[in-house]
Image: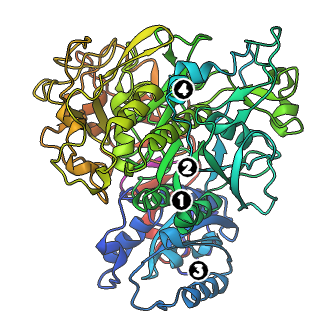
Amino acid sequence: MSRTKTGKKWKIRLAGSAVIFLAGFFGAPDAAAQAPSRSTPEDRIGRIERRLSPEVVEDLVAGVLSRNTRRTIPVIVQFRSDSPTASSDSGLRLLERERLVESMGGNPGQDLSIIEGMAMEIPLERLIDLADLDDVVRISSDAIVTGDTLPVFEDATSPSSIVVTTGADQAQKAGATGKDVTIAVIDTGFRDGYGLKIVAAEDFTNTGKRDRYGHGTHVAGIIGADVKGNDSDDDKGKGNDSSFSGIAPDVRLISLKALGDKGFGRTSDVIAAFNWCVKNKKKYRLDAINLSAGHGPKESYLTDPLSRAAQHAVEAGILVVASAGNNGFLQGHLVIGGINSPAFNPLVIAVGATNSNGTARRSDDTVAKFSSRGPSFPNLLAKPDLVAPGVKITSLNVPDSVLAKSFPALVSKDKKFITLSGASMSTAVVTGAMALVLDENSALNTNLARAVLMYTAQKMTAPNLLEQGNGLVNAEGAARLADAISKNVDRARPGERIIRIGATKPVSYIAGERILWGMAMVAGNAIVYGQHISHLAPAVWGNGVNWANQILWTDQILWSDALIQVLQPTFAAGSTWGGKLAWSNQILWSQQILWTDQILWTDQILWTDQILWTDQILWTDLLKILKLEGLTPHQILWSDQILWSDQILWTDQILWSDQILWSDQDQILWTDIITGNLG
């Protein structure tokens, strides 16, 4: 086929393929996408649509417009697990897939069995052919994963401040130190001899296990370093103390290097690390994974490869704590919807950052401006799950690392510590708190351990639901509640009492302040209350948090909240949340949450960063969540280059609608591309 547009002739080979530009890129791989169907061209088009992620489509469009479809791009391909044509032997199946990739002119990469996938480099001109294969479920970008760390050039706070402000020091004095708990840290590796109890180390980057960037060692130090030394009066409180304790100083750590020596890596390497964790869970008695990294939201958590790998780890009985990201502020605007992958998966604990403002007191804490806000893109789930200190956090330093050399002003005088900021640090704080919880009660499964952290978190005064989630982590309360739960809870049935009435009180005392537990949980798309909080009244967020009918506890009030004292069905072993909660008193946050004037259309933008939205994600659905009373927005400023209306997304290069792809110079109808020759 040949067609002339604006005097130009298109001669671009797509190997007999079709480029598809329809809605549906965010849908989960369903039966129709997995089953072979050749009945009509429309069926074939629809099948291919569902298998190409938005970012892959974007790369393909760029290749078409630049007349360069022979270049290769890194992708992750997920295959059917029940393929009738593939070999039942895993080794032979891998060999078959490698030969397939090579036959298309591509380069096979890592086997990602945890998601029945493979990393590869594939020519753009063969993407449609690959997506059209019966065994293929999804083709996604092998996105860059980065650690969520920001340099903050201000005076460092005391290295012990995070231990005090979280209440971890009290938990440690009560005997919870993370002993017999094993945490895998997927990051840039560790350095030996830094007060870390390292039981294993693996490298997935082909750069060696050693931490040359400095991020992984810093994160590990927050979780569980135990550095002994003699403190001088001159150094105390200035970030230069020669001794240092992490949140859980006796925790066992596994270093999984999936981010390279420049602080970033490929999604496929991180997935390979998750795969290792699942395979070695029993060998190392692995309890949790810390991922102080991620990539921006590209597609639904149901199809995103990194999200699916993290979910498989949780389903295998390993808690996953991940950074929500530092996507909360861009070009002078607050941003909503920038929760990272895999943190946007409802089974993963997403952690945002707070600013302790240099004190151990919690009353002056605020959510950091850079911290990613919900709802998650594109599934619009309530995230983050928790927030924790993440501004000016002092931890272990690797003197010859990239970070230490790049930011010498952030390094202590004795070179032992460096002060960094970001959701990476907050994630490590929550992971350390989780280690204390599991130390107190090893019988807790992933759902119940997660619930303990959320239930005891402190609801902050000013931030709204999509900024703080369940609130500010409370390590003291979480460890104490875990200890109060029956040590035989792993054998309990839903409906059985797991905590005796009056066993403890839902209040903590941290840094001289009285801290009330939130005693409610926000997860996925639901807010769950205990019996003392009415499920009939909505929760109001915005300029303050008002949990309806919340009881202010005193020492004389007995605790009898059925939410946590009786084993709920969702807390039972083997149950997964999957974005929905099976609660009798479930309240959908999209229907019940009222926003106040803290959420201003003129002051906030929605997450985009080269993400192409289609009409699969209805603008009206988002308006139901974000619409302010008395405001009727018609068109919203998305960024400096993108303007969104009810049906069309317009950038400086591409204008999307249901039928037409426009560029600055040429018009291409998707129906004209099916033949493989653009004219």
Residue type, label 1:
Arg
Q: Residue at x 28, y 27 (%)?
A: 519
Residue type, label 2:
Asp
Between disc 3 and disc 2, the foreground one is 2
Badge 2 element: loop
Q: Residue at x 53, y 81 (%)?
A: 16
Residue type, label 3:
Ala
Between disc 1 and disc 2, the foreground one is 2
Q: Nearer the viewer, residue 2 or 589?
A: 589
**Upstream in sequence: badge 4 or badge 3:** 3
Residue 180 marker: 2
Few, some or many residues within 10 Å of mark 4 (<14, 14–19, 20+):
few
Kindly check if marks 1 and 2 are in contact, taking CB atoms under 8 A apart as contact: yes
Kindly check if marks 1 and 3 are in contact, taking CB atoms under 8 A apart as contact: no
The residues colored magenta run: 654-658
Mark 3, residue position: 15
In percent of width and height, residue 428 lies at 58, 37
Q: How was the colour assigned to the protein in this rendering? A: rainbow
Distance Cα–Cα, label 1 vs label 2: 9 Å
Badge 3 element: loop
Q: Residue at x 58, y 87 (%)?
A: 91
Secondary structure mostly seen in the magenta stretch? loop
Q: Nearer the viewer, residue 147 or 49?
A: 147
As drawn, 338 above or below 75? above
As drawn, 103 above or below 365? below
Residue type, label 4:
Lys
Between disc 1 and disc 3, the foreground one is 1
Mark 1, residue position: 285
Mark 4, residue position: 173
